[in-house]
Image: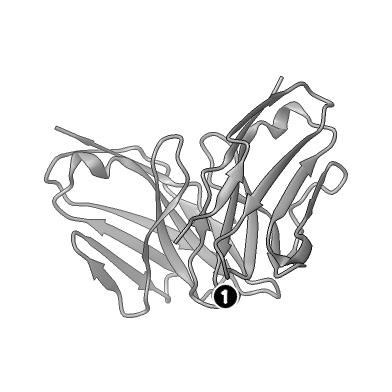
Amino acid sequence: RKEVEQDPGPFNVPEGATVAFNCTYSNSASQSFFWYRQDCRKEPKLLMSVYSSGNEDGRFTAQLNRASQYISLLIRDSKLSDSATYLCVVNLMDSSYKLIFGSGTRLLVRP
Amino acid sequence: EAGVAQSPRYKIIEKRQSVAFWCNPISGHATLYWYQQILGQGPKLLIQFQNNGVVDDSQLPKDRFSAERLKGVDSTLKIQPAKLEDSAVYLCASSLVWISNSPLHFGNGTRLTVT
């Protein structure tokens, strides 16, 4: 099983739609979770951290489900500019505290 | 605040040649990472430094890749000799604190093409 898994997509949605992505992780002791956004041929940029109680930033909501070992990202009222690849990042609770990336979920928002 | 600086932006070399990449992290960031991102995949951690010490290099192909972070600031990543499968974007990232909820800040990356 991969340490961090994501559905590669693409998710093709119309403007204004609500879309959700999940990311599963294998290490039950993981403590830090992030969502990054990566535009084509650009570097990843932090979208939001994911907190235990869930958190919201405008149209974006992140949730953590420790029991089932997944995190989710919900995007409401999708904009054309939301088209990007969304990367899930989880720390490995080993001696090095590595931050491991999923392979990303591609989102295409169409007019 | 100035971001993570990387150079060069692009590099094209032939297989079996050598190449080096440079990274200057955000001032004050103790932890520095090198990631390799192959087209269509997520970034893969190659090596992680805490100040000038290596925390993890378990995924670094040590027969051909080397990295150093002298004085705990700038870092260089070297490939010698390069193979075709090394074609990728090499991303440097830094974070303020190790073992915390401190996120990564990435540089623009170096796009390497090995022919």
> Which amino acid lies under the numbered mark 1 shown in the image of this protein?
Val
In the depicted view, which residue is nearer to us: A5 or A110?
A: A110
B19 versus A29 height, above or below: above
Q: Residues within 10 Å of mark 1 (few under 14, many from 20)?
A: some
What is the quadrant of residue A105 in the picture?
A: top left
The C terminus of chain A: image quadrant: top left
Could you tell whether B113 is left or right of A28 in the image? right
The N terminus of chain A: image quadrant: bottom right
Q: Which residue is denoted by mark 1 in the rendering?
A: B97
What is the quadrant of residue A8 in the picture?
A: top left
In the depicted view, which residue is nearer to us: B37 or B112?
A: B112
Residue B28: image x %, image y %?
Answer: 58, 70
What is the quadrant of residue B112 in the picture?
A: top right
Residue at 84 percent of width and 41 percent of height:
B64
Residue B3: image x %, image y %?
Answer: 49, 55
Residue A62: image x %, image y %?
Answer: 31, 66
Residue at 45 percent of width and 68 percent of height:
A33
Residue A3: image x %, image y %?
Answer: 58, 59
Could you tell whether A69 is left or right of B61 in the image? left
A9 versus A22 height, above or below: above
Element at label 1 = loop
A93 versus A39 height, above or below: below
Residue at 49 percent of width and 54 percent of height:
A5
